[in-house]
Image (cartoon, rainbow, N blue to C red):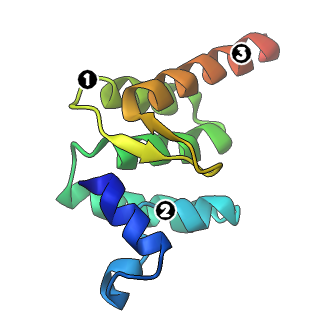
Amino acid sequence: MRIMLFLSLAAGLAAPALATDRTGYKAIAAGDYQKAEETLLVERRIFPRRPELMINLATVYARTGRVAEAAALYRAAMQVEPVEMMLPDGMVSSSHEVAQRGVNNLSRVTLAVR
């Protein structure tokens, strides 16, 4: 259901109220991590178990140097029911797969820092 809503939004078929960036994607893409974090924290208060919110917030944490917090959120996203997610390249992937890639990328970053 969420993937269909996203496709409708991309096609410009959704009502303007639905077109707001509630997943922080636009702010993350623009490099505005503070705005993305604010948006995601508000949305997570309403929808604490939505994996796409966890994954995007984990991305913000990873990009702002909060590796432990990012890892915890990626792992939490793997513990809830998976959803299909549309990636920036247009591909569709399970939220569990996306979260696992996030954890793997954090491991590489951590190893590189040591």
Residue holding disc 2: 24
Please tell me which residue lies in front, 54 or 37. 54
**What is the spatial separation of the Cα atoms under label 3 and label 1, in whole angstroms?**
22 Å
Q: Is residue 42 above or below residue 103?
A: below
Q: Is residue 77 left or right of residue 108?
A: left
Image position, residue 111 (x, y; %): 74, 10
Image position, residue 77 (x, y; %): 33, 31
Residue at figure coordinates x 48%, y 21% from the top left: 100
Residue at figure coordinates x 61%, y 37% from the top left: 62
Residue at figure coordinates x 53%, y 60% from the top left: 25
**What is the spatial separation of the Cα atoms under label 1 and label 2, in whole angstroms?**
21 Å
Q: Is residue 81 above or below residue 107?
A: below
Q: Is residue 80 above or below residue 47?
A: above
Amino acid type at circle 2 is Gly
**Placement of the N terminus among the 4 image quadrants:** bottom left
Q: Is residue 20 left or right of residue 76?
A: right
Residue holding disc 1: 79
| Callout 2: SS | loop
Residue at figure coordinates x 32%, y 79% from the top left: 18
